[in-house]
Amino acid sequence: MAAPLICPSILASDFSKLGEEVRALDAAGADWIHVDVMDGHFVPNITLGPDIVKSIRPHTRLPFDVHLMVAPVDPWLEAYREAGADILTVHPESGPHLHRTLGRIRQLGAKAGVVLNPGTPLTVLEEVVELVDLVLLMSVNPGFGGQSFIPTSLRKIEKARALLDAAGSKAHLQVDGGVTGANAAACVAAGADALVAGSFVFKGGPDAYAANIQALKVA
């Protein structure tokens, strides 16, 4: 079984030195940089605007995996793409026309992803699977870092993997929320091939990032 892609979430980083943090993650062996964008409306928190994403883009060549927890989301797609997003993931609940939104992301030259909250059914994915490069399953309810993994998420990962395989999709299956060295192996065994981790990767400071990332890869 191949090691999963590790996508550290900079939501858990030291915001006073984001450029340094991104460089440290790159040096530590991260595969993607996961950027959580929250608007204080779709989720109860506010985080990173496009200007901040643009400011950290020069600090690494790693793909920027930008998770848009924003509603309405369509007006922001171009701004985050121009800021340096390589992947834009959106929630079905963040706009009235998911199929159109995913198509627009692809028109902008980015990879398109769909995010499913714990309470969002997989049936949504069935209708847009041909437009999706990434499926992100939330294993917590979005809005804040540091939450505990919802155990029933493993069953949803298995079902999502079966759906993607049946459709012949090459989309990555990513998990986000409470991912640690204790549950990473179970997530991968269930079918995930990309793991978002915040608190686990950033614990111990920059000197520990490489070991924390490796622990997720081999777990």
Image (spheres, grey):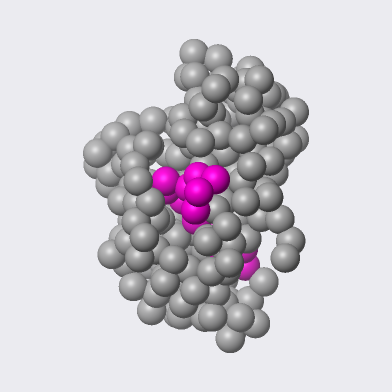
- Residue 154: horizontal and vertical position, in percent? 44, 66
In this view of the protein, can residue 17 be seen by the observer?
yes
Q: In this rendering, would 132 be left or right of 42? A: right
Q: Residue at x 59, y 62 (%)?
A: 188
Q: Which quadrant of the structure image shows residue 84?
A: top right
Q: Which quadrant of the structure image shows residue 97?
A: bottom left
- Residue 180: horizontal and vertical position, in percent? 50, 45
Q: In this view, does 27 lie above or below 138?
A: above
Q: In this rendering, would 101 be left or right of 62? A: left
Q: In this rendering, would 147 be left or right of 133? A: left
Tally the marks. 0
Q: In this view, does 93 lie above or below 56?
A: below
- Residue 110: horizontal and vertical position, in percent? 63, 53
The range drawn in magenta is 171-183
The quarter of the rendered structure image containing the N terminus is bottom right
In magenta segment, residue 175: yes
Q: Which residue is drawn at 62% across and 51% down?
A: 219
- Residue 62: horizontal and vertical position, in percent? 71, 39
